[in-house]
Image: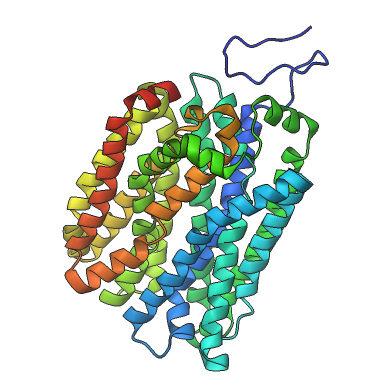
Amino acid sequence: MTTTRTHSDAVPADTSGHQAPITPGEIAVGVSIGRASEYFDFFVYAIASVLVFPALFFPFETQLVGTLYSFVIFSFAFIARPFGTVMFMKLQERFGREAKLTLALFALGTTTAGIAFLPTYDDIGAYAIVLLALFRLGQGFALGGAWDGLPSLLALNAPANRKGWYAMVGQLGTPVGFIVAASLFAYMLANVSEKDFFEWAWRYPFFVAFAINVVALFARLRLVATDDYAKLLDQRELQPSSVSKLAKGQGRVVLIGALATLASYALFHLVTVFPLSWLSLYSDRTITDILMVEIVGAFFALGGVVLSGILADRIGRRTMLGSLAALIAVFSLFIPAFLGGGELGENLFIIIGFILLGLSYGQASGAVTANFEARFRYTGAALTADMAWLLGAAFAPLVALGLSAHFGVTSVTLYLLSGAASTLAVLWFNKASYARDQ
């Protein structure tokens, strides 16, 4: 007997007379695996940007200036990411999505693991900085190519009354990636001497990244390479499209999607990377202690991501994003009090920040997928994510640390407040778009 579904967003039935085996749950698992592996790579680099690179690649500067230089290179990946998206989509059109995904994940793992082999400034001088920058650009370029369309497919095939829940499942991989990366560094710092850490131990997490990418590659290819997945993509018209035509016809939708989640993405690195740099410079706490608090915060973020799925299905994604932007704005007002409140205040800044991050980031994926014309959804969703990271997160550690060092932590309040205001403004002026998305 042929089973049919009653809602419009159900996975279509197979023409052979049985239901297509790919379910929204399987797609969500694929998205989570992809997120965890990709952002483990990025968090390994982000943590090393604070703990390692200032001392080994910028030893000729003070710790503050060296960290700021390190954050400049940190931003390169987000600048390169949209270019990687466009280039790898060209490769997909010619060689297929399996070849594109394999090459992108191999490049991501190779550039991340390659950082573990880099000589330092004491070895080859300024050439070490150039190599670090090139590998960082390679990370971003490869991450742009790792787009497989699974988040868009998940958004379009999730049951109509559970879209928030399935969108949340796909976001769980990001805090998991942070927990694993931070735990590795915390373990190294706690079990080796400072001399050994800077000589060899810091390189170990970068090796692990390559192994994780290999496992993730096979897990994702198992789904992506199936005939059913290909049919489902074709039915949803999730194929690469012309970037120039997208920019001309639906560039506004890309910009709206990026700005609608700006509060979440601005908060992202302000609670993961910025506290690590600020507290290492302006407090007496050990790096291990700070990392352990952030790991606890990341577990709270996991709970926040799960809760976001429940709330979004009850009150709507637009209301959810707007409410969290308002809460992030309120949170920003207390940043000076938190960071000036001793160890307790610092811990509250991290924990509360992670909770808000989980609640907001849980619904940041695919917020406007339904607003793209079908032929632009695949490319449009990828570039929307790229622009959200670039506008919201790429320069957050650099700007926050630079402003706080020269003008005090009140300036961080203004920075985060501007992100929250942008999100609220976009949601207000685009009510109709988000009504369609619901």
The N terminus, quarter of image: top right
**Residue 288 coordinates in the image, percent (x, y):** 42, 70
Q: Nearer the viewer, residue 59 or 254?
A: 254
Image point (16%, 59%), residue name: 337
- Rendered view: 233 above or below 269: above
Specify the quadrant of the image occupied by residue 13: top right
Residue 438 visible to the viewer: no
Residue 145 visible to the viewer: yes
- Rendered view: 344 above or below 387: below
Q: Please, which residue is most extreme toward the right here? A: 16
Image point (38%, 22%), residue name: 435
The C terminus, quarter of image: top left
Q: How is the image coloured?
A: rainbow
**Residue 215 coordinates in the image, percent (x, y):** 71, 53
Q: Nearer the viewer, residue 49 or 275?
A: 49
Specify the quadrant of the image occupied by residue 382: top right
Q: Nearer the viewer, residue 221 or 40?
A: 221
**Residue 258 coordinates in the image, percent (x, y):** 41, 43
Image point (45%, 44%), residue name: 302
